Image: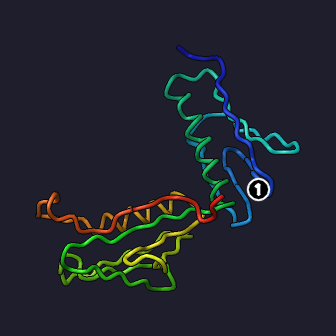
Amino acid sequence: MRDVIQTEELDVPEGVTVEVKSRLITVTGPRGTLKKNVRHVQMDIQLIQSKSGKVTLAVWQGARKHNACLRTIRSLINNLVIGVTKGFQYKMRTVYAHFPINCIIQEGGSSLEIRNFLGEKAVRHIQMLEGVTIAESKNQKDELILEGTDIQNVSQSAASIQGICRVRNKDIRKFLDGIYVSERGTIETD
């Protein structure tokens, strides 16, 4: 059954400005500017200016799947706001049983080189996506820290690192070697 109107609201914190122009959302904050194009979803996106700004999303005459897009777009805008205020941080751990995995950070934290994975001679190169920096942890051995403002770029860079270290042609229950995400969060903690 179609509803006449479905709405979602999102409060914008102080110090963050949100601009909406023909479903192209631009969020500016202390950590920079992020843009998101949501023109593929038909909905009204309005910015209500008051003491604390609000973003109102509305779908008219939407079916069930169309109404589900409301919460998705609200979450995307919320992630943009969190990214420009706190930033996102993923921690990854290298796991190995016998051959120690060597991770070499290159180009000032914008690319990673992985050597000696399962004792293989092949060298794996991963380029971080735009706005993502990688560093070794000072506190923990065999830990990598990925930081950035865009959650999609940070998480995709982590997924690329984990995906390039997949064990092939062996029993994955026995060969658990790899680089895995151990913790997700924000750079600035409350």
Give the quarter of the image for residue 160. bottom left
- Most extreme residue toward the left is 170
* Residue appearing at x 48%, y 75% in the figure: 134
Q: Which residue is mark 1?
A: 16
Q: Is residue 180 left or right of residue 175?
A: right
- Using a 10 Å C-alpha cutoff, classify the residue at mark 1 as few (fewer than 14 neighbours), some (14 to 19) or many (20 or more): some
Mark 1: amino acid: Val
Q: Provide residue 182's location: percent of width, then percent of height.
A: 40, 62
The answer to whether 65 is drawn above or below residue 89 in the figure is above
Position of residue 53 in the picture relative to residue 26 (left or right):
right
- Residue most extreme to the right: 51
* Residue placed furthest toward the top: 1
Residue for point 73% across, 47% down: 20
Q: Position of residue 24 (x, y in %)?
A: 66, 49
Q: Nearer the viewer, residue 110 or 146?
A: 146
Q: Which image quarter: residue 61? A: top right
Q: Position of residue 139 (x, y in %)?
A: 47, 77
Q: Residue at x 75, y 47 (%)?
A: 12
Residue 37, position in %: x, y?
A: 60, 50
